[in-house]
Amino acid sequence: MNNIERLVENKIKYSKIEWINDPFPHAIIDDFLPTELFFEISNKLTHVDDIKDLKKSFKTHVELNKKVYGDKDLNDDLRIPIRAMGSDTIKGIFKKYLDIQKMISLSDWSDYGGYFPLHSMKSGGLLGAHVDHSHSKNELLHVANSIFYASNKWHESWGGETLLCNSNGFKIIKKITPKPNRLILFVHSSSSFHGVNTITSPIDVYRNTYYMDYYINDEELPPMT
C-alpha cells in the first residue's frame, strides 16, 4: 500500500460517511487530507497561473472565469489530491453504495494526463447547471464524481458553492460551500444536474478544485426498480 492510499484509508476508517439522497446521492468528507499536507498543496496553488499545462479557458455566460489544467506540469505534491481521489478507498465507498464489484477512476488510465483534473475559477466566475458525459472514450459508464476544494481559505460570503439541482436542472436544491480540504462525492446520472454559484472572492483569491470521474462496465450497473 502506498503512502497516499494509507492516508486516505486511515481518514475514512475514522469517518462516518453519510449519504444524502436529495436531490441525488451525495456525501461530504471534511478535513480529507492531513492539515499540514493540505496547506503545503493549497499554498502552492496560490500561484496556479504559473502552471503551464493550461487546457482551456472559459469565458461564456454559462461557464465564466474558469481555467482547467492537465497534470503534466504538476509537481508530486500537486498530484497528491489526484492520487487520493482515485484511490481504492474512495472507489470502495462508491462500490459499497452502488453495490458493484468493479470500478475505475480517471487516474487508473495511463493517458490520464489528457484530462483536466485541476480547475481554477476567480471572482465573477460561475458554472451553469449541467450533467457530465455519460461514457468515457473507452465506452465505460460514468457513474460517480468527486470534487476536492483546494483553496487555502474561503469565506461563505464569497459564494462559489457547488450547486445541486433538481432533475431538470432548473431549481437549486442544495448549496455546498467550497470549504478548504473538503471532498464531496456524488453519484452521476442523467439527472444529477450540478453547477457553481457566482464567485465574489477578492480578485487575488481563486476557487481551486480537483475533479475526478469514476466508471464501470455497463453490465455492472445495478438493476433499477
Image (cartoon, rainbow, N blue to C red):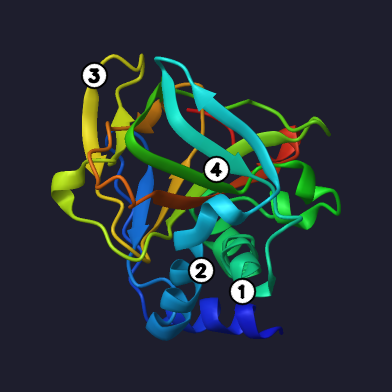
Instruction: Specify the label residue 77 is tagged with.
Output: 1
**To which residue does mark 3 refer?**
171
The type of residue carrying mark 2 is Lys
Q: Is disc 2 surrounded by few (<14), some (14 to 19) or many (20+) residues within 10 Å?
A: some
- State the CA–CA distance, disc 4 to disc 2: 28 Å
Tag 1's secondary structure? helix
**To which residue does mark 4 refer?**
144
First along the sequence among labels 3 and 2 = 2
- State the CA–CA distance, disc 1 to disc 3: 38 Å
Q: Circles 3 and 2: CB distance less than 8 Å?
A: no
Q: Which of marks 4 and 2 is in front?
A: 2
Q: In this view, does 161 lie above or below 76?
A: above
In this rendered view, identify the residue nearer to me: 191 or 102.
191
Percent x, y of residue 46: 44, 61
In this rendered view, identify the residue nearer to me: 2 or 68.
68
The type of residue carrying mark 3 is Lys
Tag 4's secondary structure? strand
Q: Circles 2 and 1: CB distance less than 8 Å?
A: yes
Q: In this view, does 122 lie above or below 65?
A: below
Q: Is residue 102 visible?
A: no
Q: In this view, does 81 lie above or below 144?
A: below
Relative placement, left or right, of 171 versus 72 is: left
Q: Which residue is drawn at 51% across and 29% down?
A: 189
Q: Which residue is drawn at 31% across and 52% down?
A: 178
